[in-house]
Amino acid sequence: MQVVYDPEEFFYRMFYYEIRLASRQVLKEGEPYSNFHPVYQIVITGFIISPEYEDLVEQFEQRNWKGQALKYAGQLMQLIFVQLPKVPLMEVKDMSLLEKWSFFLKYFEDEGKQSIIKEVIKQEEGIAMADSIIKYMSQEWINQLNEEFEQLSINDNIRMENARIKRAKEKGREEGILEGQKQVIQTLSQSMSIEEISKVLQKPVKEIQKLLQTI
């Protein structure tokens, strides 16, 4: 599930995650390479990954310039995006199973969509089970998940800031560095105090305050 988007870093990050998933498979000595299991990375995004990708689901695999899949191994590593902003608003009876799941993920907390959500839950046992799990999760478990997601978000923001600074330095644009810092600080300030941001980014509190005043 991805909510942090940087057009120049996002796809590198997803490719890194996919390689990390694949590398967890360790073949024993003498074991044939054909025992390698396919890797499917399903990325659910709260944003549109790029204007040219128009569908709710965009699936990528290894192909040559003619569009031909790599023989035997072309589908071994697939990167699949589900773009929640692309979820269509339609009658439940006209939704595919994938559209029902996507609608549930996007709108299950939306008060204005609860009548549709209830109909989706009524029709699909799997979604009904997911709804039950969410409702009966302990507050301790929810807090733990929120902490983990927050830390992941912080790490991703720091990585993106470092990437922006690197690009800006290479192009000699101090303005780009400052803008990158502002964006990261603005995102972190939604869930962290100035003192916490100062500690994470290793910047003086006064500098953080000054940057926040210019946002």
Image (cartoon, helix red, strand yellow):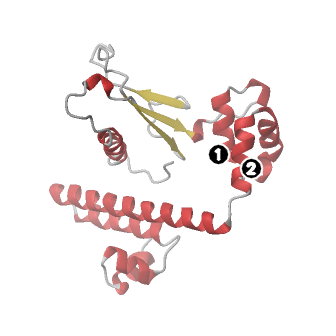
Give the total of numbered labels: 2
Report the disc number at residue 132. Answer: 2
**What's the residue at 68%, 39% (across, down)?**
103
Q: Secondary structure at mark 2?
A: helix
Quadrant of the snapshot with the C terminus = bottom left
**What's the residue at 80%, 47% (across, down)?**
114
Looking at marks 2 and 1 on the same chain, the residue that comes earlier in the sequence is marked by 1
Q: Answer left or right for 152 relative to 62.
A: right
Q: Amino acid at mark 1?
A: Lys
Would you identify the image quadrant in which residue 84 lies? top right
Would you identify the image quadrant in which residue 139 lies? bottom right
Q: Residues within 10 Å of mark 2 (few under 14, many from 20)?
A: few
Would you identify the image quadrant in which residue 121 lies? top right
Residue lying furthest bottom: 206
Q: Is residue 113 above or below residue 189?
A: above
Q: Is residue 145 above or below residue 38?
A: below
Q: Residues within 10 Å of mark 1 (few under 14, many from 20)?
A: some
Q: Secondary structure at mark 1?
A: helix
| Label 2, label 1: how far apart the Cα atoms are | 17 Å
Q: Answer left or right for 33 relative to 42.
A: left
- Residue on which the image places disc 1: 106
Query: Who is closer to the viewer here, 215 or 87?
Result: 87
Q: Amino acid at mark 2?
A: Ser
Q: Position of residue 178 (x, y in %)?
A: 30, 67
Q: Answer left or right for 90 relative to 12.
A: right
Q: Position of residue 183 (x, y in %)?
A: 40, 64
**What's the residue at 75%, 24% (across, down)?**
94
Q: Is residue 91 visible?
A: no
Q: Answer left or right for 91 relative to 72.
A: right
Q: Position of residue 109 (x, y in %)?
A: 72, 53
